[in-house]
């Protein structure tokens, strides 16, 4: 696994952005996260070491793309084609693009995208039902080979069944919100989405509890270093049984 941030900085557009970790981290060092800048890692996928080998090798596998911004941010319209060119060349890697701007995908995709690229997964976020009902129909309508849903931070109970029933979603990831101003995440919300995923045979990942976690009517304050571990210990993540080989 690797992270590639070709640009940094973003603009808040929905409730899930309220306590953005990028803004929080930048503010701690006196930086304005609303200023979008190209980073020194812009060309990372094609960068080579002294031996002429890619610094991101095929062994890195998944490359999480633009984690301190949004790949489809308007400010980056002039830089994005160069990223598509690099992604096109590195078919030995698998690029994961997580976005709150799935509505901009069609105007931002490369001219040779066709019905999608095999080595690109597009993940649409939905922190509440309103954003799920706005973004997920768009995600499902687009020419994309691999689609995932990410509800993180999960801010309320969400129903995803009608989107999962299409068979076009490969995984759902849910998790709570971190940080000093974190909003609560209720375990019942997690279990509901897990149940829907089990109904349709879709892998489900409970990624993290968040800092304020509600379970069985009790509210727990959980330190950042334990949030992912506690989610894993819950055993809530789900992988459908594999079909037997013929």
Image: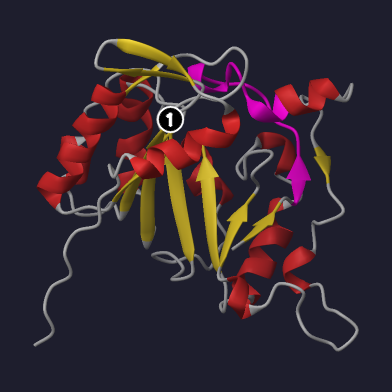
Q: Does the image show residue 143? A: no
Reading the image, the residue beneath label 1 is 209
Q: Is residue 191 left or right of residue 76?
A: left
Q: Which residues are magenta?
A: 6-23
Q: Does the image show residue 66? A: yes
Q: Residue at x 76, y 73 (%)?
A: 46
For the N terminus, which image quadrant? bottom right
Nearer to me, 202 or 115: 202
Q: Position of residue 86 (x, y in %)?
A: 69, 68
Q: Position of residue 156 (x, y in %)?
A: 33, 17
Q: Residues within 10 Å of mark 1 (few under 14, many from 20)?
A: many
Give the total number of marks visible in the rendering.
Answer: 1
Q: Position of residue 81 (x, y in %)?
A: 69, 58
For the C terminus, which image quadrant? bottom left
Q: Position of residue 134 (x, y in %)?
A: 35, 27
Vertical placement of 7 versus 10: above or below?
below
Q: Is residue 103 left or right of residue 32?
A: left
Task: Say whether residue 20 is magenta.
Answer: yes
Q: Quadrant of residue 2?
A: bottom right
């Amino acid at each position: 696994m690797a992270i590639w941030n070709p640009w940094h900085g973003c603009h808040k557009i929905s409730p899930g952005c309220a306590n953005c970790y990028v803004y929080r981290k930048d503010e701690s060092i006196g930086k304005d996260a609303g200023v979008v800048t190209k980073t020194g890692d812009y060309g990372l996928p094609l960068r080579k070491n002294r031996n002429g080998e890619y610094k991101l090798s095929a062994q890195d596998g998944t490359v999480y793309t633009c984690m301190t911004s949004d790949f489809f941010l308007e400010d980056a319209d002039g830089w994005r084609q160069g990223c598509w060119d690099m992604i096109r060349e590195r078919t030995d890697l698998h690029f994961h693009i997580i976005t709150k701007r799935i509505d901009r995908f069609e105007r931002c995709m490369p001219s040779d995208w066709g019905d999608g690229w095999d080595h690109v997964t597009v993940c649409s976020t939905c922190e509440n039902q309103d954003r799920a009902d706005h973004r997920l129909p768009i995600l499902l309508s687009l020419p994309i080979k691999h689609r995932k849903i990410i509800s993180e931070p999960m801010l309320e109970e969400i129903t995803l069944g009608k989107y999962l029933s299409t068979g076009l979603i490969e995984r759902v990831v849910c998790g709570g919100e971190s940080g000093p101003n974190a909003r609560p995440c209720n375990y019942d919300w997690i279990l509901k989405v897990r149940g829907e995923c089990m109904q349709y045979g879709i892998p489900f990942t409970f990624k993290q509890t968040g800092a304020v976690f509600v379970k069985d009517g009790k509210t727990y304050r959980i330190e950042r270093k334990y949030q992912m571990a506690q989610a894993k210990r819950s055993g809530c993540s789900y992988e459908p049984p594999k079909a037997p080989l013929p």
